[in-house]
Image (cartoon, grey):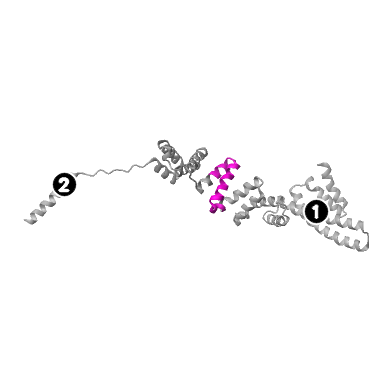
Amino acid sequence: MKRFALYFFVAVLFLAVACSGPKKVTTPVVSDKELAEQAGLSGNYEKALELWSLYFTKTPVEQVAGSDFANAAGVAFKAGNTSQSVSWFDQARYKNFASAEMYLTLAEIYKEQKNISKELTALEYLQTNYPEKSGIISRRLFEVYNEIKEPGKALNAWKNMNQTEQNDIQLLNQYFELQKGLKDTLVCDSLANVLLDKDAKNVAALEWNAFKYYWKGENRYQREMEKYNSNKTNKQYKILLEELDKSTADFKKSLGYLDRLWNIEPGKKYASYFANIYARFGDEAKAKSYDKYLKNN
């Protein structure tokens, strides 16, 4: 009897389950915002831009988070729509939202637009509020400060750059020009040689060394000749000869760099230096061969 009751119970249970039919599966609704985020993460920026626009159209602005505007702005930038990107970043700022990524993107946009004032504002905001990003932005800060003639700030930016960037030939040329403007001859002497090690035809560095040794020899020559003309004694004459030997050595060093410059750009620009050096050497023929460039050009 008990066994019969058990069979009866199992049969009833099976029948109840069978009669209940398959259960309906409900699919969760995915919002436009979630779809936009998914599209952005997958790299489909055009679709993400479209979905963010749809989300903002449907959602009252007071219900939209500043971070949403910033995320959408980043997508717009990657999709190539910089005007929309800036507009949404403005909305994010209005919502008091800020992030390092947001200002890095803004700086990049303003750089593309050649709006150096707004780019600098974005970079300086990063420097002040996200000092951990100094390594990323220091190169561009250096370039901008150089361009707007802010040498002190440019030097500070240079110090924050890593060694790889400081060895970059383009940046070294800019740093060299900066130091020339600051008249730091010791640094320039060192930089000129570094630049020539990297590029034997670097005109700025060749000129620095050529003119440095030229004026060192010329100034010594004139100074010692003046001393001798004021005191024509045997002792002073002996001093004069010793000093003129030093001038000659400097002139020869200058010629080494001038020859390389002449091979790059022969003509009037360097002819006067050649003419004067050979005149000091007493080689009138060579001096006159360069004089003609001064007369004909």
Which residue is more in the foreground, 225 or 128? 128
- Indicate the amino acid at tag 2: Ala
- Indicate the amino acid at tag 1: Trp
- Where in the figure is residue 284, as x and y percent of width and height? 88, 51
Which residue is more in the foreground, 3 or 132? 132
- Where in the figure is residue 202, as x and y percent of width and height? 70, 51
Q: Is residue 123 inside the magenta stretch?
A: yes
Count residues near mark 1 (Cα–Cα under 10 Å), then give few for <14, some for 14-19, many for 20+: some
Magenta-drawn segment = 106-134
Does dot 2 land on a helix, a strand or a loop? helix
- Where in the figure is residue 204, as x and y percent of width and height? 71, 50
Q: Is residue 140 inside the magenta stretch?
A: no
Q: Which mark is residue 16?
A: 2
For this orientation, the residue located farthest to the top is 57
- Where in the figure is residue 135, as x and y percent of width and height? 56, 53
Q: Which mark is residue 74?
A: none
Which residue is more in the foreground, 283 or 121? 121
Q: Is residue 209 left or right of residue 23?
A: right
The residue at the point 83 percent across, 58 percent down is 247
Count residues near mark 2 (Cα–Cα under 10 Å), then give few for <14, some for 14-19, many for 20+: few
Does dot 1 land on a helix, a strand or a loop? helix
Question: Toward which corner of the image does residue 185 lie, by quadrant?
Answer: bottom right
Main SS of residues in magenta: helix
Q: Which mark is residue 215?
A: 1
Quarter placement of the N terminus: bottom left
Quarter placement of the C terminus: top right
